[in-house]
Image: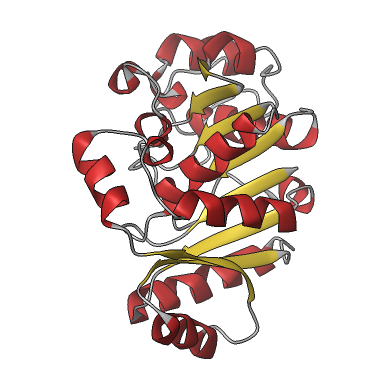
Amino acid sequence: MKLAISGKGGVGKTTFAALLIRSLSRDGRRVLAIDADPDANLAAALGIADADKITPIADMKDLVFERTGAQPGSIGGYFSLNPKVDDLPEALSAKLENIKLMRLGGVSKGGAGCICPESSLLKALVRHVVLQRDEVVVMDMEAGIEHLGRATAKAVDKLIVVVEPGRRSIDTAGHIKQLASEIKLNNIAVVGNKIRGPKDEAFLKEHLDGFEFLGFLPFDDALIEADLQGQSPFDVDSAAIAVVKEMISRL
């Protein structure tokens, strides 16, 4: 099962990703978690020790040069568009329970669509884990889906968009759906987060008509407190954990 998770910043996307990944791991599944959002901190949300010390792959200059033949930050010139990456999930992942986590990082030069060595390596790695790995793969994406190419998108089983009751979150969901349609990624579902009651559910269903809803996570002070204390949301007493397990059974 290959899942990509996206959504506007602040909606609880990484919290949901962490709950999903830890739940899958506790069910005995091997999970390859990909932190593809430069601003997210999936490792900390999973409860991985020394999460702040994990170096993003995009920042590993020697590795980028070794695999692509070009220095990071360079644009133009010659470099490999199909670098060797099949050994990286074992070599560069942080581990917890049945989980391997890789932090991709961001490409800081040339914009989101730049053709540069770092971008080439990251896209090749995502392509490999989606097309050739036999674990469950869960990718915590940013609000865009820049790491997914057309060929990769065809192998993603579900793009899950996390939303909260609010106009900006809804607008972002529509934008993500448009981006996904351009690469033929049409198997999309929505997870509502920070739901205070039936009115919030009804609001999202009304304004996201045509989306499949995978489920709704309740507004929960325990999850907020976990974030403040640097705990994994999976390690606190929250009704959201049971809800996520129900979503897994649907997936």
Q: Which residue is at 66% across, 31% downward?
A: 124
Horizontal relation, residue 193 to residue 138: left or right: left
Q: Which residue is at 48% across, 87% downward?
A: 202
The residue nearer to you, when weighing 73 against 21, is 21
Q: Residue 54 in the image: x percent, y percent?
A: 37, 18
The furthest residue to the bottom: 206
| Vertical order, 180 against 96 (above or below) | below
Q: Residue 216 in the image: x percent, y percent?
A: 51, 67
The chosen color scheme is: secondary structure
Q: Count the marks: how many?
A: 0
Q: Is residue 113 visible?
A: no
Horizontal relation, residue 121 to residue 197: left or right: right
For the C terminus, the image quarter is bottom right
Q: Residue 188 in the image: x percent, y percent?
A: 66, 65
| Vertical order, 124 against 227 (above or below) | above
The quarter holding residue 159 reads bottom right
The residue nearer to you, when weighing 51 against 113, is 51
The residue nearer to you, when weighing 97 against 51, is 97
For the N terminus, the image quarter is top right
Q: Residue 204 in the image: x percent, y percent?
A: 47, 82
Q: Which residue is at 38% across, 44% downward?
A: 237
| Vertical order, 213 against 41 (above or below) | below
Q: Which residue is at 65% across, 84% downward?
A: 210
The furthest residue to the left: 228
Q: Is residue 160 visible?
A: yes
